[in-house]
Image: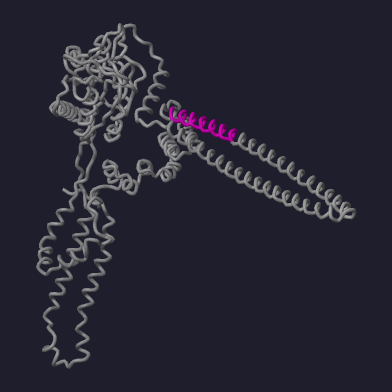
Amino acid sequence: MIDLSLFHFLRPQWFFALIPLLLLIWLMFFRKTGDRSWEAICDEKLLPHILIRGLSGTRHVSMALTATGGLLAIMALAGPVWEKLPQPIFTSQNALVIALDLTRSMDASDVSPSRLERARFKIRDILEQRDEGQTALLIYAGDAFVITPLTDDVETIKSQLNALTTNIMPASGNRAGIAIAKAVDLLKQAGMKRGDVLLITDEVNLDEAKERATGLRNQGYRLSIMGVGTQHGVPVPLPDGGFLKGKNGEIVIPVLDEAPLRQLSAAGGGKYIRLAKDDHDITLLTDYFTTSARGNEQISTELKTDVWREQGPWLVLCLLPLAALLFRRGYVFVLAFLLFPCPDAAYALDWDSLWLRKDQQGQRAMATRDYEKAAELFNDPAWKAAAQHRSGDYQAAVGVLEELGEVGNHYNRGNSLARMGRYQEAIAAYDKALAELPEHEDAKFNKELLEKELEQQQSQQQDQDQQQAQDQQQDEQQSQQEQDQWQDEQGSDTDQQQDNRQLQQEQDRQQGQDQQQAERDDSSAQDDEEQNQQRRMDEQEERQEDKRLDDRQIARLEEAKADEERQATEQWLRRIPDDPSGLLRKKFRYQYQQRNYQTEPNEQTW
């Protein structure tokens, strides 16, 4: 029974297609009157022999079939509905928090190449096999720290794995209980009523961790453990040589003690499994997490939504006879050539666009690390800015994020500005993020890091300015000395000229007394004059040579100054950390100092 009060069309905009349908019918009707032109020029008795008049009824049938078929197709596309169906809503509650042990014992090589390396490989395998749900990663030793909160972006977690080494931990110890408590906090913050925690370690302090595992189980979560290592163990090598030693100076040989690990996993209601050489352990854990999560989804999702039952497909059945006629006449092939004239047509259909929104296509491009394509596809400005930042187009990312609010956008804008070297603007962006969320630890850390960098740059600039001032003062002093020397030389030349004039006058007086003596004096005076001229020429050449030496000295000073600037730039670049673990090490040290934990009396020191 059709309830006419509920009858409507889901996509009424398709009725605009009636306009081209009516135009097509009008053109078909107009073609019918084309025979009258023959009646105007031919004799009436000849028309039966020229024209075939029996086709007028066929034309009427074609017009009627075209109108009927077009109307049925448009109505089917518009989506006629009048009945609702209940539809259940399913939400994924498959949440997993991975807690990785980063104590010094994880550097042991009884599992090749080391316990930590194999654990990282296993985490990567787990992430690759998780096709749904959210995953988080944290690390622990003397304290626990979050690498990534719960997210469905496993590529972000994978990118952090290589930076996880034992030397980034600010405190020694093996406090698995703190890691379990931190994992529970992550699940609660995400609103997960069900979830799994996977502890990857070689040993635990059962007295401390068992109470936390029991509390985790009482809150609806489960604790599973993957044991790493062997029962015989090997010494732990140190980066600077030698082996790890205990409090009394003995060499530490950590072994895999599975009994406490099994007891802890049983207290947490989960599963214990030892790390294997093949993928057997990963398959078991993944199936264990996924199967349980599906059961939880069936129980916990009780919400329902109303979905309309569309009746349009039934109208398509009426078009099948008409479609058969179109195939017979070849119209379908003509239509195919009209829609697809060539593979490179500008309006060819995009297969992905038929099934995925632009944002979904952008997320797929992000997953394949094609960030430039993702930036072009995304409509969501925050996602577009993230893709632009990862592709290295920091300026475009800043332009998009400037128009957005919220804490995360301010923080991301600060990161892009920092990448561009615009530290002052980056600090201002971090300040905006902290004004809205004062406990944003990443913004605090990045801001402090940039402020220290600016202080170092200013200190270097002041040193360079002082050095330039000293160099300029030395140049001025040297120039003054050269000027004084030149003035002294000029004064010496003036005295010499006066002596020459006096000598000439004395020669003139002697010439009047004794001509013969004058000739001899004349000859002697000429020799003296030539010697004086030669001496002045030599002095002038010496001054020119000194000037050339000064020019070379100035060039050497300028070259030395340029070398100093290059060395200063290289020293500043060398201060940038090369290892990806450096930033994490500083971040965790800062967080550990803020927490100010007290060391337990019997806590292990490695």
Residue 16 lies, in percent from the top left, at 28, 61
Compared to residue 374, the image places residue 434 above or below, namely above
Residue 103 visible in the snapshot: no
Can you say which quadrant of the picture contains the C terminus?
top left
Seen from this angle, which residue lies furthest front?
516
Query: Depth check: 590 or 252 in front?
Result: 252
Q: What residue is rendered at 19% in x and 15% in y? A: 233
Q: Quadrant of residue 153?
A: top left
330 lies left or right of 373: left
- The color scheme shown is one colour
Query: Depth check: 397 or 181 in front?
Result: 397
583 lies left or right of 117: right
Residue 542 lies, in percent from the top left, at 65, 45
Query: Depth check: 256 or 191 in front?
Result: 256
Label total for image: 0
| Magenta stretch encompasses residue 454 | yes
Q: What residue is rendered at 61% in x and 36% in y? A: 471
Residue 346 visible in the snapshot: yes
Residue 593 lies, in percent from the top left, at 42, 18
* Span of residues in magenta: 445-467
Q: Quadrant of residue 207?
A: top left
Residue 519 lies, in percent from the top left, at 81, 55
Compared to residue 342, the image places residue 194 above or below, namely above
| Magenta stretch encompasses residue 85 | no
Majority SS type along the magenta span: helix
Q: What residue is rendered at 20% in x and 56% in y? A: 76
